[in-house]
Amino acid sequence: MIRAVVLAAGKGTRMKSARSKVLHEICGRPMLWYVLQALRGAGIEEILVVANGELEAQIGAFGVASVVQEEQLGTGDAVRVALERLAPKAKGRIVVACGDMPLVTAELFRGMTGSLDSEDGEDAAMALVTVKMPLPSYFGRIVRRGRAVERIVEVSDATPEQLAIDEMNAGIYAFDEAALREAVAQLRPENAQGEYYLTDTVSYFVNAGKQVRPVLATDHLHVLGINDRAELAAARKEMNARLCAQHMRDGVTIVDPITTYLEPELEIGSDTVIYPNTSIGRLSRLGKGCVVGPNSRLSNAAAGDRVTIRESVVVDSTLGDDVSIGPYAHLRGETQLGDRVHVGNFVEIKKSRLARRVKVSHLSYLGDATVGEETNVGAGTITCNYDGAKKNETTIGRDVSIGSNTSLVAPVTVGDGALTGAGSVVTKDVPGGERVAGNPARPLPKKTPGQE
Ligand code: UD1
Ligand code: MG
């Protein structure tokens, strides 16, 4: 059984932030979220996060156990605190990861834990990920004797010859649990920083005649630890490229992945095209054959097939098939649009339901409104939904013609097939089939047969 300990109690001083480092986000999720995803992707479900008090208060959202390390006495002390919390398991294995490495992959964890196994003879006590990196670097150096790893030397304890080594300790390990418990109990803070170094377990195992297996990471980005805002931006760029690549593999055209900002857990149908300067986030779902962007933002949006969203913002809203939005429209507040609805230039729609084939083509605000099928809302129509104290609803039936520049003073209902003339200020309900105009709007003479 493999369990994981995620180290995240460090202060993250270089972020210069009131927020715990691992809670800083890349592509819409905290760094820690990605590390947990990668561990779970490798089949590791039981995870204990070593937190500071500030992180501990936020950890509930992540669905993992946590333990507070009161004083940051080093990575070895952090693991000791975790081991005290974890009930000992015979033949257990423990992965140790860092909460600030959001680009780490499930494959890396799998490869590392797998390398503890031995085909013949004794399983290793420890496997660790190493990485070739350009110098200078603040990472611990891997000192080898022949092909075997002999020890890890921290930069502050290293000799000039050791500092010239370009193979680094990534800070990700897998341990045989019993061996780890034994080694951690032996750690002493006898080094330049006066800290308990988890990395000292390497020489402990080597001296005890136990196996330590290095696993070389293929890409140093996978083990990029985030220490400041510049590294945070670099990690975001890499993660975004990965997310774009994944959707492109699934049949989505992304015209410019550099300026397309995605988040994890999106659903985007094949043959959808995303134009530049577009961000899509918060569990948005798009069907097939859609066109989104340029210059658009979708957040918690759901759209059917063949939907077009140009230069617009769609937040917390649901769109049917063949809907077209924009340019320069803003949908929000649980708005729902039926199939073939058209929302045009400079239109804001909040918390409204528009049935199929409704058109709101220009310069309008619909708030707290319900609009029936095939109704046309003329340019400049405004629902006056706020009376200074509360929001009121507007109900518009089907096949209604709302004339340009109509003000609908809510609460108000316009019945099926009714019409409002240009500039109407509708303060009273309009019965079905009635034609009204003026301020305040009054009924117009009835249509006579043959009259348009
Ligand atoms: C550590 C390694 C170094 C490696 C590097 C990779 C040690 C002694 N050194 O260095 O060989 O190259 O990581 O990034 O382990 N943490 C705690 N409690 C503590 C101290 C740290 O939870 O008391 C956590 C931090 O939040 C962080 C992780 O452990 O997530 C690593 O700590 P950090 O201080 O970054 O380790 P380094 O000294 O940089
Ligand atoms: Mg570090």
Image (cartoon, helix red, strand yellow):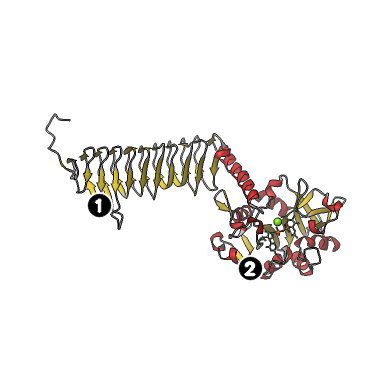
**Within-10-Å neighbours for mark 1: few <14, some 14–19, many 20+:** many
Residue under the image location 72 percent in, 63 percent down: 75
Residue 193 at x, y percent in the picture: 77, 63
Residue under the image location 47 percent in, 40 percent down: 296
**Is disc 1 in contact with disc 2, using a CB cutoff of under 8 Å?**
no
Above or below: residue 411 compared with residue 330: below
Residue nearest the viewer, comparing 100 with 347: 347
Q: Amino acid at mark 2?
A: Val
Q: Which residue is mark 1?
A: 411
In the picture, the quarter occupied by the C terminus is: top left
Residue under the image location 71 percent in, 50 percent down: 111
Residue 40 at x, y percent in the picture: 61, 55
Residue 198 at x, y percent in the picture: 75, 62
Residue nearest the viewer, comparing 22 with 143: 22
**Within-10-Å neighbours for mark 2: few <14, some 14–19, many 20+:** some
Helix, strand or loop for disc 2: strand
In the picture, the quarter occupied by the N terminus is: bottom right
Residue 44: which quarter of the image?
bottom right
Q: Amino acid at mark 1?
A: Pro
Above or below: residue 71 compared with residue 378: below
Nearest-to-viewer mark from 1 and 2: 1
Residue nearest the viewer, comparing 22 with 14: 14
The label on residue 68 is: 2
Disc 1 versus disc 2: distance between alpha carbons? 54 Å
